[in-house]
Image (cartoon, rainbow, N blue to C red):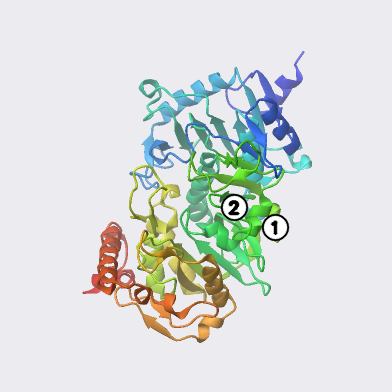
Amino acid sequence: METLQEKTLERLNIPQLDRVKKLHYNLSVTELVEATIQRQQGVLTSTGALACDTGEFTGRSPKDKYIVKDAITEHTVWWGEVNQPFSSDDFSVVYNRVIEHLKYKEIFVRDAYACAAPEYKMTIRVVTESPWQNLFANNLFLRTTAEEQVDFNYEWLIIAAPSFRANPAIDQTRQHNFTIIDFSRKVILIGGSGYTGEIKKGIFTVLNYILPQDKGVLSMHCSANIGEKGDTAIFFGLSGTGKTTLSADPTRQLIGDDEHGWNSDSVFNIEGGCYAKCVNLTQEKEPQIFSAIKYGTLLENVNFIGRTLEVDYSNSEKTENTRAAYPIDFIENAVSPSIGGKPKNIFFLTCDAFGVLPPLSQLTREQAMYHFISGYTAKVAGTEAGITEPQSTFSACFGKPFLPLHPIKYAEMLGKKLDETNVKVWLINTGWTGGPYGIGERINLKYTRSMIAAVLNGDMDKMVYVNHPIFGLKMPTTCPDVPQAILNPKSTCSDKLAYDNQALNLANEFISNFNTYSDYTSSHIQVGGPILSRK
């Protein structure tokens, strides 16, 4: 006679998985939290959040991410440093070895979906080795109801097996950890790493392939919110630029903090939760995120104050990439469903550690295209091992590691959106003023919030603008509740010659990076770059 577990395994419909040590199917949040604590894999903090460590990896490992190269992907994927090819036969070997590994483990299964817009809904089955990884999947994907789980048919399968260590000689991986995406089998296979961000970014990569090609939808690495008048704003930006922080605005409804699609009528959230960086988090600066860290939230790689269970958000000994994963409805004014109308304003966020770019500037269509393809920000000392001084970083479309298609595909789609709408595009520098990192100071968050508020309420439509002499950006001369002096970055520097040199150096870096894509773009987009490139 079949056991309940055998019946459940048959129902799960996972190829080759005919047995496991024990199976846990769609456990509740409480059950997942209790299972984690019982296994001594995490502790409850003073606010009730579950704190766990992800182990060896505290961030993504882009050099160990692969896409299976086959008839579907061979001529469509942007192969190279970002998208490394993996053979279908080699994938079969790794998959079978991971499945065999799981047969001797407890597994936790979660049925979920992506894309809040019903017409793009993608069903997902997530298999994890630990209950806290399963809690992450519950929090970050859109959640299924008990009724939906009865006859649930998944389209994509994610298997996360951190205790499986690949053997490069057998598995053809670079080292023991890997993320492999197979578009034919519709499987994302993760091994050797407990970092949960690989789970969410795996599905984002998949949708960055499917939505633009098959659905005509622009997929975006951005946050989004809605004002009282129904006006949607979207915020593009790399990690550390303020994408999550600035979209969590108590005066506006949150659509989502990281991944969205833009179709002909709306902007919709791809996810069902937020994955907020919480290094140096304070209630004063980020009250909504701070309040969301409660029972049901998963905290990753945080440290505590002394021997207490109170989290020390200023302590980054384990990693700068401490994270909080929580359902989107933990943000009090999140909109449900997570859908907004066409955007009225687009913000490109950058953390310029050289103190060159203005804190606020309005972009022409050509500048918007240029800066979207560039995707500039800077890393400062301490953010990664080996970085001792500011370093420029360019990530096409503000999400290069997750783009399976050539960046120009997404840029062209954005250009078409700009042509079809009256959306305004702004560049926001959340980095340094008064000089570079180590000399100047970080732009005050309250000033950045005031600038964004002035844009959203229409105040900046009435202001006088002047052009930046090197980047050609339109800089306002005044902005409500913002000191006039900081609006022009050169005026805040005591050493004007040093500023000019920094600006010229940065402009040359922009030009050098853009040359990578110049053969794929029309000449009018290059007009949006630094003035140096026009001479």
Mark pair 1, 2: CA separation? 11 Å
The reply, left or right, for residue 229 in relation to residue 170 is right
Q: Residues within 10 Å of mark 1 (few under 14, many from 20)?
A: few
Dot 1: what SS? Answer: loop
Corner quadrant of residue 384: top left
Query: Label 1: which residue?
Result: 337
Identify the disc placed on residue 270: 2
Nearest the eye: 1 or 402 = 402
In percent of width and height, residue 239 lies at: 47, 53
Nearest the eye: 370 or 355 = 355
Q: Residue furthest front?
A: 306
The reply, left or right, for residue 228 in relation to residue 69 is right
Is 254 situated above or below 368?
A: above
The reply, left or right, for residue 278 in relation to residue 68 is right
Identify the disc placed on residue 146: none
Is 263 situated above or below 44?
A: below
Is 398 situated above or below 360?
A: above
Q: Residues within 10 Å of mark 2 (few under 14, many from 20)?
A: many
Dot 2: what SS? Answer: loop
Asked if residue 348 shows in the view, the reply is yes
Q: Residue at x 49, y 32 (%)?
A: 193
Nearest the eye: 56 or 61 = 56
In percent of width and height, residue 248 lies at: 61, 61
